[in-house]
Image: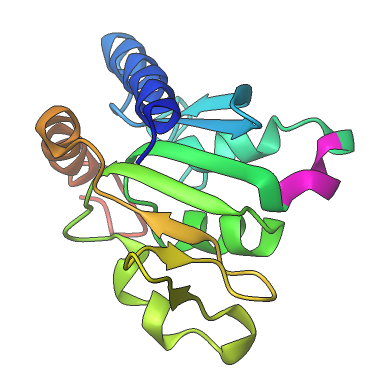
Amino acid sequence: MSDDHRQLLARAVELALANEARGGLPVGAVIALRGRIIAEGASEVPGPPYHPGRHAEMQALSRVAIELWPEAAQMVVVTTLEPCLMCFGACLLHGIGRVVFGAIDQRGGASFIRPHLPPYYQTSGDQNGDQTGGPIGGPAWHGPLDPGTCDPLYQRTDQAFAKLPCGRPQP
């Protein structure tokens, strides 16, 4: 990965740590276009109020200026944690060109589903083994970029997430 991706991940880590200090989950995401950050987000799932759709990537995607969407294929989403199915699907359907993540989400990451996508969204490896976007849409997928920094964030996120309602009956 490039130094640009590492700098973008460093910003996502800053967002995650600041969010955790405010009582949120330590997950941060940035979206860049031509090396410049155009949107940022941090997980707002716990709230208040609790909202299961306010993941860091979703927050960042919602903050991209509408006039920039024609350039989605040149955008990169950089996040501290491997995107879940919802966030991966949003990146895919928004036409994002590349996703870079700091740590693997062992329990909820979308890597496992990528080989099973319909052909319309398939990706293929290039000569370096990197996952490159398909002809229609699948974003290039790179990670983990910095597990030394981001794995502890994932562990704390996983522990906190286990305490959230997430559609489970509450006592």
Residue occupying the point 54% across, 61% down: 139
Q: Quadrant of the N terminus?
A: top left
**Residue 13 percent location from the top left of the image:** 32, 22
User: With 2 as the anchor, is 163 left or right in this view?
Assistant: left
Q: Residue at x 46, y 35 (%)?
A: 56
Give residue 84's quadrant in the image.
Answer: bottom left
Relative to 89, does residue 117 appear above or below in the rendering?
below
Frontmost residue, 127 versus 140: 127
Residue 130 in picture, x, y percent from top left: 37, 63
State the extent of the magenta-drawn residues as a range: 68-72
Q: What is the chief secondary structure element of the magenta stretch?
A: helix
Q: How many marks?
A: 0
Horizontal and vertical percent position of residue 11 = 41, 18
40 or 97, which is in the foreground?
97
Residue at (82, 37) in percent of width and height: 68
Q: Quick check: 53 above or below 128?
A: above
Q: Is residue 64 magenta?
A: no
